[in-house]
Image: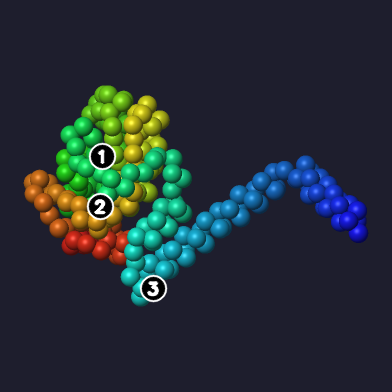
Amino acid sequence: MRNINLKNTFCKTLTINSYLNLYPLETKNSTFAAMKLIKYLQVFSLLFLILFSNVVVGQDDIDRALKIWNKESIPYINPENLSISDSILFLDTREKEEYNVSHLKNAIWIGYKDFDEAKVLTIIPDKSQPIIVYCSIGVRSENIGERLKKLGYTKILNLHGGIFEWKNKGGEVFNNQNMATDSVHAFSLLWGKLLHEGVKVY
């Protein structure tokens, strides 16, 4: 019986390997499509939970969103481990209207859709400058962090949970007059559910 099982296993393996050898492109495309479908289902499930659930959306949902959307290509730094320091450069990767409502103290706006590599290289000539990028929760900032990395910057961290988690945990934010404010741009009604502290602005 044991020999039969081994034989059956060998035959199945041979059949699968033969198929992979004969149809490598089709198999690769099918696998890629399946992976994309799984990711879309994860995203849909998360969005459904945030939008329609009566349960208070919490830290776990920010963590779940980051695990779905991010590759963790840029190391995180948690808000509780972060202190505002002149030696660290904070880069805001949101849209200008979001930055105008409030931002981290002394943060420089570099944008997302309007990200300008030449401008960044002019503003930050030192490629070894410690940089922390952030956005609403940390998705857009990872993308910009990757672009900064390609430009040669070597000390980049991504603020875990972005300005939402920063505010949720008691961090201060400032308006364009460098005055502390309670207002935070919530990005959208959906993502605004992840922001629990402060005054939401849309």
Q: Upstream in the sequence, badge 1 or badge 2?
A: 1
Depth order, front residue of 9/17 = 9
Q: Upstream in the sequence, badge 2 or badge 3?
A: 3
**Label 1 crowd bin: few (<14), some (14–19), many (20+), radius 10 Å:** many
Q: Give the residue pinned by disc 3.
A: 53
Expressed as whole percent of the image width and height from the top left, the position of residue 35 reads: 58, 53
Q: Amino acid at mark 1?
A: Leu
Quarter of the image where one finds residue 153: top left
Tell me which residue sits at (41%, 68%) in the image.
49
Q: Give the residue pinned by disc 1.
A: 91
Tell me which residue sits at (39%, 40%) in the image.
75
Depth order, front residue of 65/6 = 6
- Visible residue check, residue 160: yes
Q: Tell me the quadrant of the picture where the C terminus can be found.
A: bottom left
Q: Amino acid at mark 2?
A: Trp
Quarter of the image where one finds residue 122: top left
Q: Which mark is residue 116?
A: none
Q: Amino acid at mark 3?
A: Ser
